[in-house]
Image: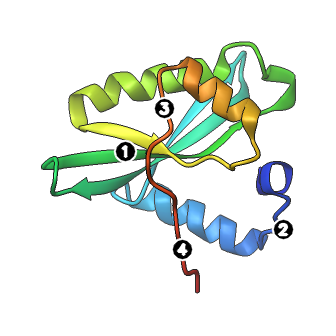
């Protein structure tokens, strides 16, 4: 996914350890997987951010991926709708970040009701 969407080469051992850590500890992340006749069609992951301004949890949608043969068939919409239904009960909202140059993804997210915020993401990675 990182190679396709961001041209990033990631260390497989680090990824495996990260996925295992999330699966072992639900407070780190929750994965949602779309099944198409016994085949994985797509996935997304939810992580959590506490908002003192809202006194509630904000869910971050991350690691979105739909396999090419399942794209434009409603797979992401089904995942998104499921997460939205759960978030309405358990969170104050949800967010995601999207590459500035990924206009296709931005259009998809906008069609589902999301909008750009007035924030930009900054980081310092170690």
Give yes or no for contact between labels 3 and 1 (Cβ–Cβ under 8 Å): no
SS class, disc 4: loop
Mark toward the start of the polypeptide (4 vs 1)? 1
Label number found at residue 112: none
Farthest bottom residue in view: 126
Q: What is the CA distance from the residue labelled 3 to the residue labelled 1?
A: 15 Å
What residue is shown with label 2? 9
Give yes or no for contact between labels 4 and 2 (Cβ–Cβ under 8 Å): no
Mark toward the start of the polypeptide (2 vs 1)? 2
Q: What is the CA distance from the residue labelled 4 to the residue labelled 2?
A: 19 Å
Q: Residue at x 35, y 53 (%)?
A: 48
Give yes or no for contact between labels 2 and 3 (Cβ–Cβ under 8 Å): no
Give yes or no for contact between labels 4 and 1 (Cβ–Cβ under 8 Å): no
Q: What is the CA distance from the residue labelled 4 to the residue labelled 1?
A: 19 Å
Label number found at residue 59: 1
What residue is shown with label 4? 123
Residue 28 place in picture, x, y as percent? 40, 60
């Amino acid at each position: 996914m990182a190679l396709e969407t961001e041209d990033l080469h990631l260390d497989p051992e680090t990824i495996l350890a990260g996925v295992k850590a999330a699966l072992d500890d639900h407070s780190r992340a929750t994965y949602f997987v779309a099944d198409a006749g016994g085949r994985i069609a797509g996935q997304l992951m939810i992580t959590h951010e506490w908002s003192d301004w809202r006194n509630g949890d904000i869910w971050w949608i991350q690691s979105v991926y739909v396999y090419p043969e399942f794209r434009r068939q409603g797979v992401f919409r089904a995942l998104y709708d499921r997460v939205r239904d759960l978030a309405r009960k358990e969170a104050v909202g949800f967010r995601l970040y999207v590459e500035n140059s990924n206009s296709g993804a931005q259009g998809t997210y906008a069609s589902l009701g999301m909008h750009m915020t007035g924030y930009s993401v900054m980081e310092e990675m170690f």
